[in-house]
Amino acid sequence: MAHWQRLFLRNQASKTRHQIGMIFERATLKNCGILLLLLTSVVLTGCIRVKQSSDTPRLLKAEDSTRAEMLAEINRFARVGSLRAKMYLKFEDNSFAEFGNKEVYRSADGEIVVQRPAKIYMKVQVPVIHSDVAQMTSDGTSFRVAILKDDGSGKLKKFIKGTNSADYSPLQKRFDSMDIEGGKDVKASVNAMANLRPQHFTDAMLVAPTDPKHTYVLSTVYQPEEDTTQQKKSPLRNVVRPYYLLDEVMTNSAGVPQISRRFWFDRVGGLRLSRLQLFDKNAEIESDIVYGLQGNLTNTGDYNNLPLEIIVTRPKEHYSMRLKYQAPEDVTIGKTYPDKAFMLENSWGLEELDLDKKLADLAVQQTTPSPRSTPAPTSAVHLN
């Protein structure tokens, strides 16, 4: 082999080795880059969270309405001047709500007659056999309650009389401290019936009309709720429902503005009066009234889109009552009833309990000095 041939082969071999080295170096750098990228990803995943989707309550679409339309809707409810109906009643005792407990009583049948301005007659019966459990009336000023059935002992049967505007909380405090024969269950039953007042339902069933002397203040609120028409585990069950709040503000005897009523209007699919809150002179809620889905009352076609179910909650008296029409088409509206229909008489000969008299007696006891505080006489006392 010639000398020049050997030099040519040696140069070619040198170039090949160099090319192979370059290829290996590029591959090494590429692999290092991939490794570095993987290491960086591992480190960063510990610091940066991957975006995750989560269920959130559906925001329901709100319809717009005017204050004039809301006032008109209140006055449409107020067209009902009197009403007579058979209803299903369910009573809940919330006396122990602060401990997360409540007592739900079995459903009862009821018959109710209401008439403006604030008259009511209510009869509570045992389902099926229709035996009277209680009857109660209010003429707008005073109330009477006849408890006709109890736990079988006969000790709870009473004819209770009182005044609508009276505050009987002092009597209640005294009752709570007493040792009642039969234990806490009997006391709870007495509490439940003693706190039930017929006049608590007149404002719920006979919505008072608006008054030009009052001011009506409009605002909005979005309320988280559960859509009971959806399955319990459905992601569509949790919603945020928009409401209009219309506050009725009156001026009291001292010339100070104070809230008297708050109307909640559901804005979904139109305008619906869904809730009414009544306030006392201290701006505390007296009644919290929820109106269920609307339907037609009577068979006349004159009273359509009115609530078929009403839930009245009395926070101070610790109870709720659910009232549902048994047959909405059989409801009677517009008839005038005599005053004697709203003045219950003790025709059963029950033991009478006059709460006004009990309240007066308690006041006397609290103002009369106890024997221990009476100064001892100066003369000697002889014990025989």
Image (cartoon, rainbow, N blue to C red):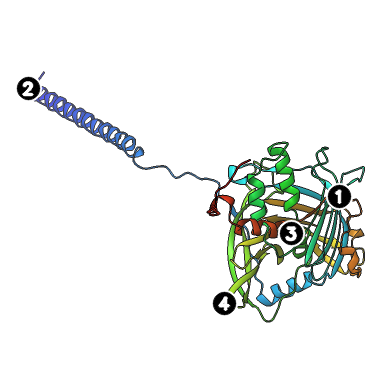
How far is mark 2 from mark 4, CA to CA?
Answer: 122 Å
Q: Residue at x 58, y 56 (%)?
A: 369
Q: Earlier in the sequence, mark 2 or mark 3?
A: 2
Tell me the crowding category of disc 3: few under 14, some 14 to 19, or many 20 or more residues within 10 angstroms, Cα based. few
**The C terminus: image quadrant:** top right
Residue type at mark 2? Answer: His
Residue 256 is marked as 4
| Residue named by callout 2 | 3
Say what secondary structure mark 1 lies in: loop
Question: Can residue 314 be seen by looking at this rendering?
Answer: yes
Q: Above or below — where is 265 with respect to 179?
A: below
Question: How far across and down, in percent of the image, does residue 319 sit?
Answer: 70, 51
> Residue 60 falls in which quadrant of the image?
bottom right
Q: Earlier in the sequence, mark 1 or mark 2?
A: 2
Q: Are marks 2 and 3 in contact (CB under 8 Å)?
A: no
Say what secondary structure mark 3 lies in: helix
Select label 4 or label 3 by which is in front: 3
Residue 216 is marked as none
Q: Above or below — where is 191 with respect to 291?
A: above
How far is mark 2 from mark 3, CA to CA?
Answer: 140 Å
Q: Are marks 4 and 3 in contact (CB under 8 Å)?
A: no
Work out whether residue 53 or residue 174 is closer to the camera in this orientation and state it. 174
Say what secondary structure mark 4 lies in: loop
| Residue named by callout 1 | 350
